[in-house]
Image (cartoon, helix red, strand yellow):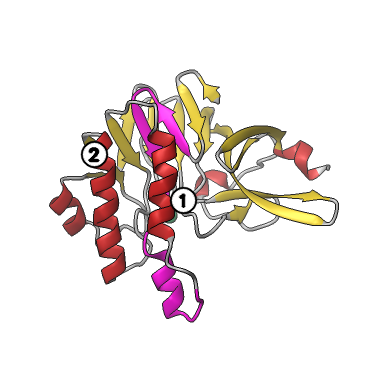
Amino acid sequence: MEIEKGIKIKDLALIVENTLVISDLHMGFEEAANKQGVLLPREQFEKTVGRLKSIIQGEKFDKVVILGDLKHEFGKTSETEWRNTLKLIDFLKKDCNTVILVKGNHDVNIDAIAKKKNVEVVETYKIGNVLFCHGHELLEDYEGAEIIVIGHEHPAISLREGIRVEKFKCFLKGKFEKKTLIVMPSFNLVTTGTDVLTERLLSPYLEQNLSEFEVYIVNEGNVLNFGRIKDLTNM
Ligand SMILES: [Mn+2]
């Protein structure tokens, strides 16, 4: 689904020209949860690769931009996280020559992985008038960009149908200082994310009235335009 000229949502990814953009994979999330006593089946890696395959299928990309938080744990990189992160980069490199990581707040010890796999690590990345940053802190310079794309927030929305409430990952599109702001959902398939209607948000880009923001829900790979937040809260 095209949401801006030349910007398309496909499943949990954004396609900008010949670039595939994914955000917030948080590899190693399960292992970190297990350590805290939360038992999660270790299927994140297989699920992630499967989902990426279905997105990449039939498309041709020169580049992949990972919009931050490739890995989950702060500090010491765990063995699973290390192994799976390397495997994931290998998988992406099969189809796209260049892998770029826009650094997120979780990507503190990422340099060894990046060096080993020849991944370019940057603070921001620009394609034409589109600027990519993780979104955990405000930038000082937007380099003349008209569109800002961020991750970090893991936006989701809970929808009620009768007595059933189901939470869906979603993209948000609104404004930030007169520029178009696009917020990507997380590609972490173990968690859904933060309900933008009821939960406290994290990103300084979203410390504003979100009622005019448009919501694009992703349901099993399908993208649905759900209109504005203000209309959803009146439902
Ligand atoms: Mn983050």
Residue 21 part of the magenta segment: yes
Which of these two is toward me, 235 or 117?
117
Where is mark 1, residue-wise?
152
Residue 56 x, y percent position in the rendering: 38, 34
Question: Earlier along the polypeptide chain: callout 1 or callout 2?
Answer: 2
Q: What residue type is labelled 1?
A: His
Which of these two is toward me, 35 or 120?
35
Which of these two is toward me, 130 or 8?
8
What residue is shown at x 43% (from left), y 36% (from top)? 55
Residue 34 x, y percent position in the rendering: 44, 76
Q: In which quarter of the image is ligand 1?
A: bottom left
60 relative to 86, above or below: above
Where is mark 2, residue-wise?
94
Q: What stretch is highlighted in magenta?
A: 13-39
In front: mark 1 or mark 2? Answer: 2
Q: In this view, does 218 lie to the left or right of 107?
A: right
Confirm or reject: label 1 Cβ below 8 Å from ligand 1.
Answer: yes
Question: The C terminus appears in which quarter of the rendering?
Answer: top right
Q: What element carries label 2?
A: helix
Residue 65 x, y percent position in the rendering: 33, 38
36 relative to 73, above or below: below
100 relative to 167, above or below: above
Label 1 CA crowd tier, 10 Å (few <14, some 14–19, many 20+): many
Residue 193 x, y percent position in the rendering: 57, 55
Q: What element carries label 1?
A: loop
What residue is shown at x 45% (from left), y 38% (from top)? 13
* Circle number at residue 169: none
Compute the Cα span from label 1 to label 2: 26 Å
Q: In this view, does 109 lie to the left or right of 16?
A: left
